[in-house]
Amino acid sequence: MQRRIFLKSGAFALVTMGLSPSFLRRTVLGMELPGAAKGKVLICLFQRGAADALNVVVPHGDDEYYRLRPRIAVPRPKSGGTATALDLDGFFGLHPSLAPLEPLWKRGLLAPIHAVGSPSTTRSHFDAQDYMESGTPDVKGTSSGWGNRYLATCGTCEEHKPTPFRGVSFTQQTPRIMQGSAETVAMNSLEEFSVRASGTHVQRLEQLYRTGSADLVHGAGEEMFDAVKMLRAANPQQYQPQNGAAYPRSQFGTRLRQIAQLIKSDVGLEVAFADVGGWDTHVNQGGATGQLAQRLDDFSQSIAALVTDLGDRMGDVVILTMSEFGRMARENGNAGTDHGHAGAMFVIGGSVKGGKVHGKWPGLQREQLFEGRDLALTTDFRTVFGEVAAKHLGAADPAKLFPDFKGPRALGVL
Amino acid sequence: MFTRLLACSVAVSTAASAAAGQSMSAVQNGREQTADQQVRHVLSRLAFGPRPGDYERVRVMGVDAWIQQQLYPDRVADPTVRQFVSQLPTYTASIAELLAEYPRPQQVQQQMARARTAADSMMARQMGAEGRVVNAELQAARVGRAVASERQLEEVLVDFWLNHFSVFSGKNAQMRYYLAAYEREAIRPHVFGKFRDMVGAVAKSAAMLIYLDNFQSQAEPGRTTLGVGPGGGGAAGRGGRGGRVTMPPPQPQRRAGLNENYARELLELHTLGVDGGYTQQDVIEVARAFTGWSVLPPEMGNGRGNQRLGSAVVQGHFVFRPQAHDAEPKTVLGTRLRAGRGIEDGEQVLDIVAKHPSTARYVATKLATRLVADEPPTSVVDRAAETFRRTDGDLREVVRTIVTSPEFFANSVYRAKVKSPFELAVSALRAVGAPPDLTPRTAQLIATLGQPVFGRQTPDGWPETADEWINTGSILNRINFGTALAAGRVPGATQQNWPLPLGLRREPREVQVDAVIAAFLGGEASPETRAVLMSGSNPLLDAVTVDSVDTGMRRPPPVVDTARVTGVDPMVLRQAAAGRAFQQLPALEGLPQVVGLALGSPEFQRR
């Protein structure tokens, strides 16, 4: 049985922030030499429950939007109210609760994509999440997730040090996107990734695995004790966010803070994953304020804090947000929205072609809507995921990440 | 550097040597394992590990007599489980009762939306809490029965077949109402019965029909379907009673058409296996045969549709919808199904796949992988597949063929399997004599170990082999679980149930270590493991400070069924429970330290 042995020396040598090349140089390097991407990190954030894309990235220039949503529409920018859409380009605007992301838009770090999602027509949360994470819409049998497939195919690349922390999910169980042959770690928190015992008990447990037969169980145990030491050397407990970053005290905020800790600890993180629920707004979802606005407050404050905290390091980081599908164009009888089709994503990072809302807008007229009710799909999520994997992570063979996908390989978001 | 043994085999410690004299009769029946090993082997493979006293009981009874008894669970009294299950009302209730008495999440959500006063909100929250009890009791039942049942082989096989026909409780909000019935009606009655009966019961279960979407599969537009019959809903009334009609073009609001999910998994995962010799066209033909196999949704329970169906059909149960059934001819795996038939199409497909030689081989291989080794010897798979064919898929006989074979009792397979998280936790609880847990807390701990009950998202079920279970993160969780259990932080693992004699607390370390190896590691530990277990003192013998005279196992906090009392969301509860169990563990000393090391050792990961 051949097991991966990660480099014990060097891997946990801590690179201080001062050693990082400048933000701009990294950006240029990253674009010129995508295959040599080193220290690149992708952070996938999943909004579980189907976020209402039309109220997140608001098409305030489309009159039909206001006809379809008399009670829950986000008011036009400068329409006089206190809470209005934050204009992006004269047609689209951000929900006012996304104000913390507005500076990123202005600095060109934020690229919203509209009418993007899965071509599958399913309106089941479970199936749609499954497809978005496996990367194979309408194929249930896929055993791995696309994040793991990236790690598996690129696991032998020389520039990638195979540490146990290449793929980390801040979730209770390993999510679908990270399942597969490459080893990844799932944890609720960094504190949890430790041998929970006192005194000499830990050393005794370690000895149980360092001695004895060289089998699968012993090997995994040895790697685990190495990994725990590696994390301890990074000292996550003493972590102080930088640049004045203020994370919300929510679970999501805490998890994003810990992703920043891992990135700055240089433990070899390449793909990080976290999810956040509460988007299934069938009832009283609110407009500029209310239920959805509260979810967006936490969402945007957490992401803004992460970007602030990472500072120059954002030149090596791409944040990708996703949700299984969008919601119906028309509000329902309970001042909420039912399950829909296409949605919206955010791509954030130093190498991102920000300052532009990407994707083709399909319109909201009845004949323009999918099945007469939902925002139509104009960009397949695999186009976006594939582009990020190829251009940002330098995936060796991006086509293999999304088998049988015949659509465009890039949208131009990077 | 540390000394390495090349072989995986574990050396016999002094504790086990007492039993070595029993090996004389072992060679008979072509069995390589000693009589002592055979007893331990059946208790770790055909049971979830031994409870205190099990080893002695099976030894007295004889391995073969015990196997024979376990193959006929009806002959084994199981009062503990009967008593346990009687305290879980939603686990024994019918789907109809659950739907009637426990509000579904949508109802709660609607209630919340309508709430105008604080009292309204309180009422709605209360409804939500009651709904969550269903899931909590379902999980408690699965774990508790495995821990406490005297019919251990039946529980092992229920675990195996629920995993073979895997369904996911998170598929949608209703799924939890269908799962107890799924276990009770589709799986449990058939684990010693005919495979055709089990696959048939699964095909008609609400759980599988919904999980793999067959309930909404209908004839493609343009296909001839059967006319309106006792199906209700759908295109009802459009084509006249009993006649054949053509599917109308799909309405923009409704998704119509064939759904291949169930058909594909039936062939790939449930019967023939991925290399079983079927084509994509077979998948489509099978899907066409199952069009109209559906579920009467709860929403229709009070509607007109239900009245038309009469009292025989219960909401949440199987229903055949003729108007959705593709009535044109089909060819499935070379067999032609003629036009104009209804439910018989699906029944015949089940006959075909249950009799297919690939199915015999696939089921035999998978059972042998669970029971014998990750790569089971071809010879035993061949014989088990032959039994399957000869007995028309009699699963009792297939299991008997495997577990009485020389291959099953070979030295090479002794302790060769790695425990799944479920097996790890259940075996640890059995080893310490824990009673079944009425709360979902133990199930939540198993979830933190990576195997939530009814929590496998994909239809392939949890892995059966070691390489899928053992990795950096999983080993960490397993070790922490062992320490938590030794520290008395796992429900039921209290000193009252402790299998070791109380007098042992004041014995020298060596005596303690031998007793722990006997009780938890099947009497065998590598010399290295034994050395580590020995590397500590007994504070009760160190006459320095005896403040902590009772440094035995700490009493756990009183068991409160938090989920029932407070109605806390199980997800929150699970995280809280995991935190409570694993955080701030006291320093272990003396006997609990030895136990914690034993439970965290590489040896305990094996069965």
Image: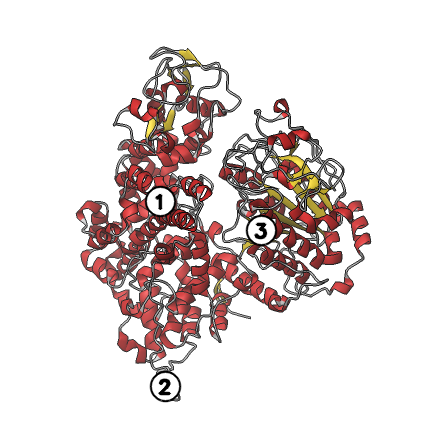
Q: Quadrant of the C terminus of chain B?
A: bottom left
Estimate the x, y position of residue A377 in percent, counting from the top left: 63, 30
| Residue A334 percent coordinates (x, y) | 50, 37
The image quadrant of residue A190 is bottom right
Query: What residue is disc 3 on?
Result: A274
Disc 1 is placed on an element classified as: helix
Q: Residues within 10 Å of mark 1 (few under 14, many from 20)?
A: many
- Say above or below: A78 vs B548: above
Q: Quadrant of residue B26?
A: bottom left
Q: Earlier in the sequence, mark 2 or mark 1?
A: 1
Which amino acid does the dot numbered 3 rest on?
Answer: Ala
Question: In front here: B200 or B321?
Answer: B321
Label at residue B546? 2
Work out whether residue B148 or residue A151 is closer to the camera in this orientation and state it.
Answer: B148
Front tag of 2 and 1:
2
Residue B328 position in % (x across, y down): 41, 14
Mark 2 and mark 1 residues within 8 Å of each other at the beta carbon: no
Instruction: Check disc 2 and give the amino acid type.
Output: Val
Task: Estimate the spatial distance between the alpha carbons at disc 3 and disc 2, rounded to whole Å.
Answer: 48 Å
Q: Nearer the viewer, mark 3 or mark 2?
A: 3
Q: Residue furthest bottom?
A: B544
Disc 2 secondary structure class? loop
Task: Give the alpha-carbon distance from disc 2 to disc 1, as whole Å.
Answer: 49 Å
| Residue that label 1 marks | B160
